[in-house]
Every structure is written in C-alpha cells, then in structure tokens.
Image (spheres, rainbow, N blue to C red):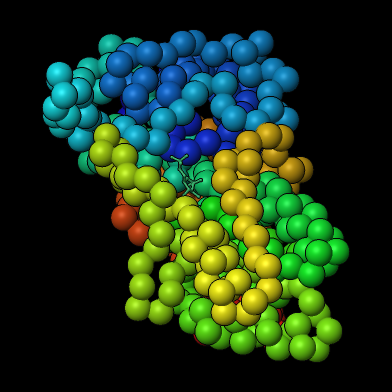
Amino acid sequence: MKNIQRIGIMTSGGDCPGLNAVIRAVAKAAMGSHNLEVMGIEDGFLGLIQNRMRMLDNKSVSNILTLGGTILGTNNKVSPRQYTVKINDRIETRDVTDRCLEHIAHNHLDALVVIGGDGSMAIAADFVRLGVNCIGVPKTIDNDLYGTDVTFGFATAVSVATDALDRIHTTAASHHRVMIVEVMGRNSGWIALHSGIASGADVILIPEIPFDVKIICDYITYRARHGKRFSIVCVSEGAIPVGGKPVVDRVDPTSPDPIRLGGIGQVLAEQVEGATGIETRTVKLGHVQRGGTPVPADRVLATEFGFKAIEILCAGERSRLVVMKGRTVTHIPLEEAEGKQRLVPPDDPLILAARNIGTCFGD
Ligand code: F6P
C-alpha cells in the first residue's frame, strides 16, 4: 500500500453548520499528528472537475471552529458522471469522471476526505470503485444519511427550528391563531419531529406519516372548543397528504437531484383556515436552518468525526464512512450508505412518546 503523504478535502452538497469544524479537525490532525499535506478542494466535486484546490496550512484552519458555512465553498448540483454544460440554449450532460481522476493524480492526492450527505457519498463510492481511497464524513441538517445514528448539522438545525417555534408560540397564543411552521428535511421528518417535540407543537407532520387534513382540522377545532384558541403545526417540507404528492418549490434541470421541496405550509394554511374558520398563518424557515454558528453538540461531533477520518486513514483503512453508532464513533464501508436514506421509522420511540402526550400526526 502506498504511503499517504497528501490528502484532498472537500465539502460537498448543501452546506450545514459544523463543516468548518470538520475541516479544522481533519487538517489539524493530519498536519499536526501525521505530517500529511492537506489540499482544500473548492466547491465540492465542482472544484475537482475544474482543478481548483489550494494547500491548507495551520493559519487557514485556525479560528474557524465556530464559523458557519464552509471556507472551501460547496456545491449541491454537480455530479462528475452527469456534468451539465450550457451550449447556447441547450443543456448537455457529460461524463467528466476521467478529468477528476487526472486532477487527483496531477495533484498527488493519495486519498480524499469527502464531507457530504447521501448524494456526495454516492459520488465518492463511484470513485472508490475506480481505485480512489475516499473517507466519508456524514453531514446534513436532514439527519437522513444511512449508516449513522446522527449527522453533524442536525442539532443546530433543530435548535434554530425550536427557537423559531418557541417564538411563534407566544404570538400564536396572543392572536388566537393557528401558526404553521415549515421546516426542511427533504423526504425525512427528523427536523420536524425533534423541533416539534422540543417546542411542544400540537401537530407534527412528517413525510413518513401521510396526513389527512380533516384529522388535523378536527383536532384544531377540538382544541379551540376546549379553551386552546391557538395551535402550532410543525410541518416538514416533504410532508404529504394520504394518496398525495409532496409540494415542489422548484425544479433545477442542471442538478442530478433536481427537485427542491417547499410550500406545503402555505397549502395547508389555506385548507385549515377554510375548514376551521380560525385565522391561519405560515412561516417557512428555509435556509436559516442551515446557516450560522454550530451549536456545541455539532462542534463536538464534527471534531470527533474529523479526527476519526484521519485516524482510520493513517491506520491503513480504505474507503470508509465515519459514523456514530450509539455513543461510539466508528466506520463502515462507504458503499454501504450508497443510494439509501435513513427515514423516520413510523414506530420510532419519539413518535410513540409524542402520541402519548397528545401530539397529532395527522393520521
Ligand atoms: O439537504 C439539506 C437541505 O437543506 C434540505 O433540507 C432541503 O430540501 C435542500 O437541502 C434545499 O436545497 P437548496 O439549498 O438547493 O435549496
């Protein structure tokens, strides 16, 4: 096995709080404890395609632990197998994987640390099959990466959503309104479930449990008749009515994963107001959940994950995904996570607990 001397690191996919904390941990452990060189690849796989990377040093990763976003930049629209180029008004798709392999060889990168979610891990798994040693570090506010109990970024997103729901609570109570707060999560309901429970939301709607709007309205009306003249609904952007489809906010034809969800809160607000007669407003939290300073739990997790990535790489491991199992940071084959999503099981203990304290899931 070739001795590892230089690694590349990238942040790929949608950003989330804690990315810089991982970059810092990886770079400090690699440079400080193992004398490795670390190249920062800019804007995820786009930087690899375009050969944009720079050498990191202690100074460049100092003072970034608490910083939101990513000093390397990121991209959630690029896949080397389906790289889209615009020619006049036409969009053409090309396979530029070979170009990436050339850039890896040209820059003498002995391994890649890919900090990303499911889409990025699928790309990394492809490179693994082509002989590139990739170590994955699981990130996403959605917490939906298969193989790990938790991803960094999730705790911060839950904290932001909970804070928003708490604030909405007081104004909803003052005005005797129904307030619907739409949170992110794509096809998984982890953010809605956790922030909904943390803030005592009356209704929590997640993609894994299709809802019946009549059940929601009956519940809100029942509450109103029993003196609770306001209700809080926490809805995941991917929530779907029974037999229905998710609400799509935009379609990006340049992205291999082109659907962006959003808008279910507004659709629901109109239906609830119409059926209950109670004024119903909606707030879409959007990207505020992804920005800003990571909470301490995410800084700790990011540091553990980053350190582990370098530890296993230097121990000779190849093509692994760093994961959290129970309270232990460990690793699994990177390809194990490919093409899978970790959804909320409908019998998750949290759902059981919430149901038993009266939370409505719309079913
Ligand atoms: O995967 C993270 C996430 O924030 C999802 O919750 C959301 O559906 C999506 O990214 C939004 O992506 P974009 O930033 O491209 O709108």
Find residue 168 and report its image quarter.
bottom right
Q: Please give the name of the residue rendered at 62% of the width and 49% of the height, measured from the top-left corner.
A: 285
Residue 137 x, y percent position in the rendering: 50, 41
Q: The N terminus appears in which quarter of the rendering?
A: top left
Q: Please give the name of the residue rendered at 43% of the width and 34% of the height, measured from the top-left corner.
A: 12
Q: Please give the name of the residue rendered at 59% of the width and 30% of the height, measured from the top-left corner.
A: 69
Decide if residue 360 is in sight here.
no
> Is 295 displayed left or right of 249 in the figure?
right
Q: Please give the name of the residue rendered at 70% of the width and 39% of the height, measured from the top-left corner.
A: 294
Q: Nearer the viewer, residue 353 or 245?
A: 245
Residue 249 higher or lower than 25, as above or below: below
Residue 162 higher or lower than 313, as above or below: below
Find residue 149 and report its image quarter.
bottom right
Decide if residue 269 is in sight here.
yes
Residue 232 x, y percent position in the rendering: 71, 68
Residue 247 x, y percent position in the rendering: 41, 59
> Is 149 displayed left or right of 277 in the figure?
left
Q: Nearer the viewer, residue 146 or 83?
A: 83
Residue 281 x, y percent position in the rendering: 65, 60
> Is 194 displayed left or right of 257 in the figure?
right
Number of numbered tags placed on the structure image: 0
